[in-house]
Amino acid sequence: MLTVDFTRFPLAPGDRVLDLGCGAGRHAFECYRRGAQVVALDQNGEEIREVAKWFAAMKEAGEAPAGATATAMEGDALNLPFPDESFDVVIISEVMEHIPDDKGVLAEMVRVLKPGGRIAITVPRYGPEKICWALSDEYHEVEGGHIRIYKADELLAKIRQAGLKPYGTHHAHALHSPYWWLKCAFGVDNDKALPVRAYHKLLVWDIMKKPALTRVAEQLLNPVVGKSFVAYATKPHLPKADAK
C-alpha cells in the first residue's frame, strides 16, 4: 500500500533514492522495482533486517531491473551518514509526526538532496487524525507515538522555510480513516471487536484484489477523509552568481 503517488513523483532508472524512516520498506521496494539505487534507512534494527531480507528476495526473484541496487541500514534521521547532495530523491512517509525536531529532520533531508532533486513527505491528515486523538489517548500517548498533528499549511510553510519549493499535494487512504476510528473507539489493541475485524477484512480484500468499486470510492473520498496528507517539493538550484 503506497502513500506516495509515483505518477506525480516520477523516478528515473538509476536515481539515487533515500527512503528515510523506511519502516517495513513499502516505498523502498517500489523504488527498487522501478530501477533506482535505493537506501532504506530506519532507527529500528529489527525492521531494517527484515527489509534487507526482502531486498535479497526481490533480487533473487528478478523483481528489480539491471542496474538497480538496494541497501538497508540503521541510522539517525537527525544525523544522516551521507555527504551533502548525495541523493536525487528523498522520501519520508509517516515519520515526521513522531519526531520532536521536525525542522532538524527537514534540514538533514535538504542537506543530502541534490539541487534539482525531489522530496516526498507524507503525514497523517489533520481532520482524521484529530478524531483519532479525540477518541483515544492510547492512540498517541505511547513511546514513539505521534506527538503532533500537522495542518497542511503548517507543513508546507516548514517545507518552504527549509529551502524547498512545493509543487503538489494530495490526500490518500480514505478507506483507512474509518478503520482507525473504529480501532480508537474499541481500543487500539483490541483486534477482536467485531466492527474492527470486519473492517480489517474489507481492507485486506481491497489491497489484495484492488476492485474497481473501492478504487473509485477511495479516489472520491480522499479529498474529504483521506488518512494521509502528501506533499511534493524540489530543491532549487542556486543562482549562478551565488554558486560557490
Image (cartoon, helix red, strand yellow):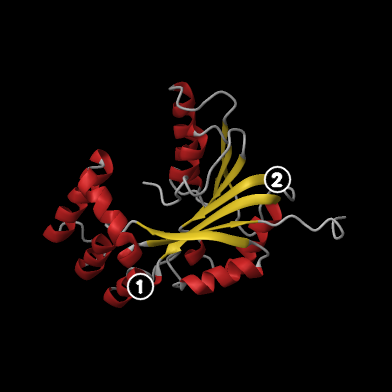
Q: Secondary structure at mark 1?
A: helix
Sequence-wise first label, 1 or 2: 2
Q: Mark 2: which amino acid?
A: Ser
Does the image show residue 206? yes
Spot occupied by residue 130 in the image (x, y as percentages of width and height):
35, 74
Answer whether labels 1 and 2 touch (C-beta < 8 Å): no
Q: Which mark is residue 127?
A: 1
Spot occupied by residue 28 in the image (x, y as percentages of width and height):
50, 42
Q: Mark 1: which amino acid?
A: Gly
Does the image show residue 100? no
Left or right side of 180 for 55: right
Quadrant (top left/top right/bottom left/bottom right) for the C terminus: bottom right
33 over 8 or under it: above or below? above
How many marks on residues? 2
How packed mark 1 is, by other alpha carbons closer than 10 Å (few <14, some 14-19, many 20 or more), is some
211 over 131 or under it: above or below? above
Task: Give the camera-side residue of 87 and 8.
Answer: 8
Q: Residue at x 53, y 65 (%)?
A: 99
193 over 148 or under it: above or below? above
Q: Determine which residue is flagged by label 2.
A: 86
Spot occupied by residue 79 in the image (x, y as percentages of width and height):
66, 56
